[in-house]
Amino acid sequence: MSIFHGDFQLQTIMGRVSYHDISEQIKEIVSKSDIKDGIITISSAHTTCSMFFDETMHDVNYFGDDFLHVDINNVMDKIVPKMTSENQYNSPGPKHIEFGLSLSDPNYPAHKWTMLNTDAHIRSSMFGSPSLTFIIKDSQILLGALGKVYFVDWDHLRERTRNVNVIVMGEK
């Protein structure tokens, strides 16, 4: 059995939920791996992000958002309203705010407003899937004719660079 590691980064946007079709990136990693038969696991350790597998829907709005993604956002807005001010949810509490303000990591700016993303954490927890696994057969990832793999960042507070890690295992 052979193992191949890969990764790539995504730039998310500020002001709205950020969806990314990552199908081509993972197909490229499968190709580089030279694995003929096996599995691929795609993972992200970001706690406000999810991944999912769905059909391409072809239609997009004026922002370029797939209609299905707009529908998902509309449903999620009803279930988990966007956080618009402190104390809207129990989290973040005073201890978490204190912790966040103590960080000196540029990925986590020491500003209280950056922690007002409880909605994104709840959406990620409900939507799930910090990782996905697919079968590789004859050097091709089995996604079907219309299947796409999507990465979504529910945290709309600021632009971010997100990391996606990939492992391909199998026989060459």
Image (cartoon, rainbow, N blue to C red):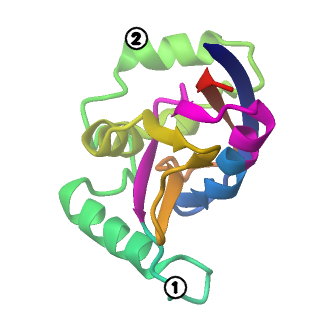
Is residue 159 visible in the rendered image? The answer is: no
The kind of residue on which mark 2 rests is: Lys
Q: Which residue is mark 1?
A: 58
Task: Report the span colored magenta.
Answer: 28-54
Please tell me which residue lies in front, 68 or 40. 40
Q: Is residue 134 left or right of residue 124?
A: right
Q: Is residue 162 left or right of residue 31?
A: left
Q: On screen, 60 above or below 21?
A: below
Q: Which residue is mark 2?
A: 95
Residue occupying image coordinates x 45% and y 63%: 144
Residue occupying image coordinates x 46% and y 39%: 135
Residue occupying image coordinates x 58% and y 62%: 15
Q: Is residue 100 left or right of residue 116?
A: right
The kind of residue on which mark 1 rests is: His
Q: Name the quarter where the N terminus is drawn.
A: top right
Q: On screen, 50 above or below 65?
A: above
Q: Residues within 10 Å of mark 1 (few under 14, many from 20)?
A: few
- Does residue 34 belong to the magenta stretch? yes
Q: Where is residue 84 shown, x and y percent of the image? A: 40, 54
SS at circle 2: helix
Q: Where is residue 171 shown, x and y percent of the image? A: 61, 23
Q: Name the quarter where the C terminus is drawn.
A: top right
Quarter location, residue 9? top right
Q: On screen, 162 above or below 24?
A: above
Q: Residues within 10 Å of mark 2 (few under 14, many from 20)?
A: few
Of pointers 2 and 1, the one earlier in the residue sequence = 1
Is residue 36 visible in the rendered image? The answer is: yes
Separation of disc 2 and disc 1 at Cα? 45 Å
Residue occupying image coordinates x 50% and y 88%: 59
